Every structure is written in structure tokens, then in C-alpha cells.
Image (cartoon, rainbow, N blue to C red):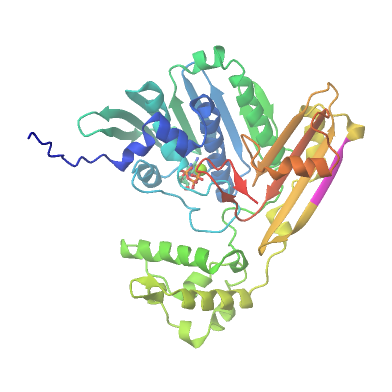
Amino acid sequence: MQRLNRTTFEISRELEFFDEKELTMQIGHEKESWPLCVLKELIDNGLDACETAGIPPEIEVTVENDFLSIRDNGSGLPTKVLKKSLDYFKRVSDKLFYVSPTRGQLGNALKTVWAVPFVLNGEHGQAEVWSQKLHHTIIVELDRISQKPAIDYRNEADPSVKKGTLIKIHWPNLACLIESKNDDLYNTMEELVMKYAAFNPHATFRIGKKVYEASDVNWKKWGPTDPTSPHWYTTETLRALIAGYISREQNGGPTRTVREFISEFRGLSRTDKQKELPEKFKDFYLHDLVKNKDIDLELVEGLLETMKGLSAPPKPTILGIIGKEHFKNWLIKHGGITEISFQYVKIIGFEDNLPHVLEVAFGIHENNERNIIVGLNWAPCLENPMEELSYLLGQMRIDRHDPISVIVHTARPRFEFVDRGKGRIEL
Ligand SMILES: Nc1ncnc2c1ncn2[C@@H]1O[C@H](COP(=O)(O)OP(=O)(O)OP(=O)(O)O)[C@@H](O)[C@H]1O
Ligand SMILES: [Mg+2]
């Protein structure tokens, strides 16, 4: 009898980003919404970068027939990070293991952004980045034999790029997308930028001819360079951060003592605090926490307890409060509400040891329209991320058809996102 001796084939995990179905999963939205998703991720990155550099953000969005570009005025996307973002076997992020209220969290977004033009076109995708005096070009093509994307990356000097980062995604049919079935896509993109202005009083945004000026460039919120608090960690999340450091050490990164490690946390930077570490952690390296190839959870638990004991839990208000005035002006200018109908509620508290600030602002819409805008950690959501929201509005006696404009914003050191697209959270 004839018999098939099956051969075991291999396909690269890299392809998980380079196929429409897979990329839809990574992005968390269908293809039609990708322009919006790319825009959102790149604005998030731009804002995070400016805040890291301590500069009031200025974000400029350009949407043309065949490209989408986002410029920020941060300190620039380093070449090393950019190159690592092209390695589809690794996630790269400076926010990955820290429990802190940053917009980015997963180290996944840039990878999806580079993959989008290729997946849409099927054969060729191109993106360009100008940053830190360099012009980078990323070309993605398919190597059909090995069934892998072939990524051609190159850079050349461009001394004219002195500050910030400009990312240009080539999108050959963006104009058709905007003009045809998705004819309000451009408006939706403009609206998204306008919503960013609602949640970021310190930032100025431009899209085409529209400008949303910062209402207060000195407005303070928790920044990406502010130390994180031990009170925001669980034994598991602290262990993950320690594992991240040890893994870097094993790959040639610096060795770190427990004392150095704890000095990076809020309330623990002073040497007298570090001296209060129990004897067993003195002269201890992070890698000494490894027992039998794993990080000893009991030791981590003891360390976390000590760190919590030596520092006070920060008040929720350090997250930052967007405030009544900013929301009021935004809702009157862009939300179509009457001044007299404006209302604002702020709820500050703790849940599972994590602080939060919830702000709700709303008013009656003059033209009988209805808008509900939700933001998490200073970034608007593309869709309602909380099923509980309608219940919340019901509690406030807001009916399903009432003509209102509502803004709901929550800041929290960590959201449990249910998907890679950071679209849905579990409360
Ligand atoms: N405009 C920028 N300026 C400076 N650095 C940037 C910029 N954009 C990205 N980065 C760096 O590249 C890293 C990867 O970005 P990416 O968006 O993929 O991940 P992330 O923002 O950390 O998390 P998420 O996937 O949730 O967005 C960031 O952590 C940041 O260090
Ligand atoms: Mg990001």
C-alpha cells in the first residue's frame, strides 16, 4: 500500500504579525479600523516620549492620499530600540514590567505598525522614521520560500532631524479608504486627535489645519520617569520585574544589588531607607534571589513587604487630575454642550491596593446628538472598554437616548487589558 510519510514543516512565529487574521488579533480591531489604531498607537508613543523627556508634548498628524505620519517633539526613538522593534521574536518596551500608569504597556505596538502596510498590500510595505539625526527606512517584503517576512532595514545620516521623532507609514490606498466605504474615516481620525486633547491639557495637537492648543503646558500628571511605588506591586508583578532585570544581566546587562533595585522605587531612594533592609538582603544581588533556576517567591514576598513597610502608599492624586475647567471648556468647544448644563464628578480612591482617579464630565447636547468618550490613562479608547459603563450612566439617570456629551476618564497604575489591542479592560 502506498503510504504518505509526512514531513514536519515549520513556519516562523514571525508570521503572526504578517497575515491579516493574525494581525487583526494583535491589533484587536478589523482592518477597516487600522488607520485609527496606528494613529492611536503612534500618538500614545509620542506623548509618552515627550513626558519621559519632560517636554510639553506637541503632536502633529498628517493624513495624505498615500501616507499617514505622526511627529512628536520628544527626545527621539533610539536606533537600538527601533531595531529591536523589528525583531518579531521579542517584545521591546521600557514599560513592560513596571506597574505604572503609562499609555503603552505591552511593547507590541511598533511591531504591528511596521506590519500593517505589508499586510494591506500583500507584497510590499514601507515605513520611514526620522529621529536623532538619522533617516531610517523599513521595507517589508515576503520571502515566499521560507514563508517569512523579509525586512530590509537601513539608515542614513540626516542632520536636519534635530528633535523628536517623525514616523511615516506608507499607505497606498489610504485615500480610497477615506473616500469610499469608509468616507468618514478622516473625520474619525480628526475626532480621535480632538479626544486626545480632552485628556491631555499639557499637549498641543495638530491634524491638517486643525490645532488643539494645550490649555495648560504646566499641568502635572504622573510621568513615565516618576518612580513607581512598591504599593502598586503584587509578589507576582514584582517577581516579573526582577526576572526582567536578571534576564538582562544574563544577556550582558549590568548586575544590580537588591539595594540598588529598591532605590528606584518611590520613597526608597534615600540611603537611610536602604540601610533599613533586613540583614539577609544586605550585600545581596538580584540574581541571589534565584533558587533552583527560579526566583524564590517567598524571598520576593519578604522583600516586597519590607519595601512597603519603608514607604508610604502614594495618594491617588499623584496620578494627576485633568480637572473641571479643562473638561468644561473642551465640552463647550468640541462636545456641543450648553454651559449651563455642565456637570463634573471626581472619584478618588483605591481598589486592590491600586489608586485611581475617575473623572466624569457631561452636559446636554445642543443639537440632540449623543457622544460618549472614554479615556484610560490619558488616551481615548476606540470603543467602550468597560461593559459597566452603561450601568454607570444608568445610575446617573442618563438614559440610553438622552442627547448628552459625556467624558469618562480613569487613571490607574495598571489596567488588566483583555486583548493585545489594549481595547477592553476588566474592572
Ligand atoms: N516616538 C517615540 N519616541 C521615543 N521613543 C519611542 C517612540 N515610540 C516608541 N518608542 C520606544 O519604543 C518602545 C516600543 O514602543 P511600542 O509602542 O512598541 O511599545 P510600548 O509603547 O512600550 O507598549 P505598547 O505596545 O503597549 O504601545 C517604547 O517602549 C519606547 O521606548
Ligand atoms: Mg506604544
* Residue 362 appears left or right of 79: right
Q: Is residue 329 visible?
A: yes
For the point 63% across and 31% down, which residue is it?
A: 193
Image coordinates for residue 178, horizontal then vertical, percent = 55, 16
Image coordinates for residue 40, horizontal then vertical, percent = 56, 35
Count numbered badges in the picture.
0
**Above or below, 315 relative to 217:** below
Direction bottom: furthest residue: 279
For the point 54% across and 22% down, which residue is it?
A: 63
Q: Is residue 264 magenta?
A: no
- State the image quarter where residue 180 is shown: top right
* Residue 358 appears left or right of 67: right
Q: What is the magenta range?
A: 342-346
Direction left: furthest residue: 1
For the point 71% across and 52% down, which residue is it?
A: 320
**Above or below, 405 relative to 267:** above
By secondary structure, the bulk of the magenta-drawn segment is best described as strand
For the point 92% across and 33% down, which residue is it?
A: 340
Q: Is residue 130 visible?
A: no
**Above or below, 121 relative to 219:** above
- State the image quarter where residue 269 is shown: bottom right
